Image (cartoon, rainbow, N blue to C red):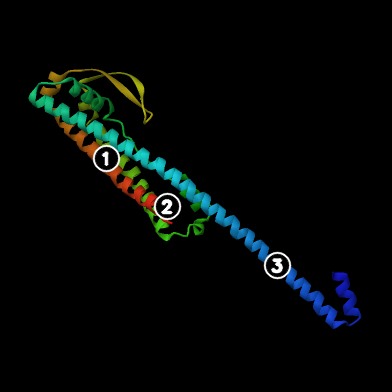
Amino acid sequence: MFQRLREKLIDQDWVGVSVELLIVVVGIFLGLQASAWYEDRRELALSDEYLERLRTEFTEIKAEIDGAIDTHQKIIDGLQRLQVVLNSGPMSDADIAAIEFGLMNVLNMDTGGGVSATYQEILTSGQLRLISNKQLISALAEYQEHVDNAKHFFADFRRMQMQYERDFNRQLTFGEPERFEPRGFQVPFVVDYDMEAMRNDADFRQALVRMMTFQIYFQAAHWQTARAAQVVSAELDNP
């Protein structure tokens, strides 16, 4: 092509030169259009992939948070039953199971749903522009803020919880840690406890109230994160 263009320039064939230049320009234009079309298709496919990964991820995240909420509720129920038994005396088999679950798990902090790996990948790769739903972007950012705040919240209250750990554990005897399913964290197994000693130990009774309060706070933090995750899921389902 360039050889023909050179020859036409030498021959001063301006019509031929114009035709050859037009062919070059059209070729470049079509090449750019094809490249732009390919890039648009690639970004559309990547956007769809991100959205599908986010849907799967937040389904799992919501399940994890729901599991954490349920775990904390079972602990709260067990500690409340223990408080009732210490005040009134009689204890049923159902009370025993609930109380022992609470005693065994009260010092464990289930953090529930965590960071969205897909959202972090989108941010670090600079691909946030591929998410066209602005409400979804806002919901993802708010969810991440809840997760970050929860980390600090849990750490602060865990330190506060430890102040009462000695008084709470004084009347308990623990065995080797066992794996608690389905959450999967290690917990010490309570093998013995002295109900009468608990009843007469004012420091234990105070620690019991504090432990219930901390569990309620942990659960409340999970509820807030759950609501933020639900907003994300709703936007992901929004066409």
Judging from the image, what secondary structure is the residue with disc 3 in? helix
The residue furthest left is 88
Q: Amino acid at mark 1?
A: Gln
Residue 95 higher or lower than 161, as above or below: above
Question: What residue is rendered at 53% in x and 49% in y?
Answer: 49
Q: Amino acid at mark 2?
A: Leu
Q: Quadrant of the C terminus?
A: bottom left
Question: What residue is rendered at 25% in x and 37% in y?
Answer: 160
Q: Quadrant of residue 89?
A: top left
Using the numbered discs, state the Cα–Cα distance from disc 2 to disc 3 in whole angstroms: 36 Å
Q: Residues within 10 Å of mark 3 (few under 14, many from 20)?
A: few
Residue 188 higher or lower than 229, as above or below: above
Judging from the image, what secondary structure is the residue with disc 2 in? helix
Res 204 visible:
no
Residue 219 numbered tag: 1
Seen from the viewer's position, the closer of residues 88 and 136 is 136
Q: Which residue is mark 2?
A: 236
| Spot occupied by residue 30 in the image (x, y as percentages of width and height) | 70, 67
Q: In the drawing, does residue 26 fall left or right of residue 49?
A: right
The residue furthest front is 239
Seen from the viewer's position, the closer of residues 158 and 57 is 57
Q: Earlier in the sequence, mark 2 or mark 1?
A: 1
Question: What residue is rendered at 50% in x and 59% in y?
Answer: 129
Q: Which residue is mark 3?
A: 30
Seen from the viewer's position, the closer of residues 35 and 123 is 35
Q: Quadrant of residue 151?
A: top left
Residue 234 higher or lower than 194, as above or below: below
Residue 9 higher or lower than 68, as above or below: below
Query: Mark 3 or mark 1, which is nearer to you?
Result: 3
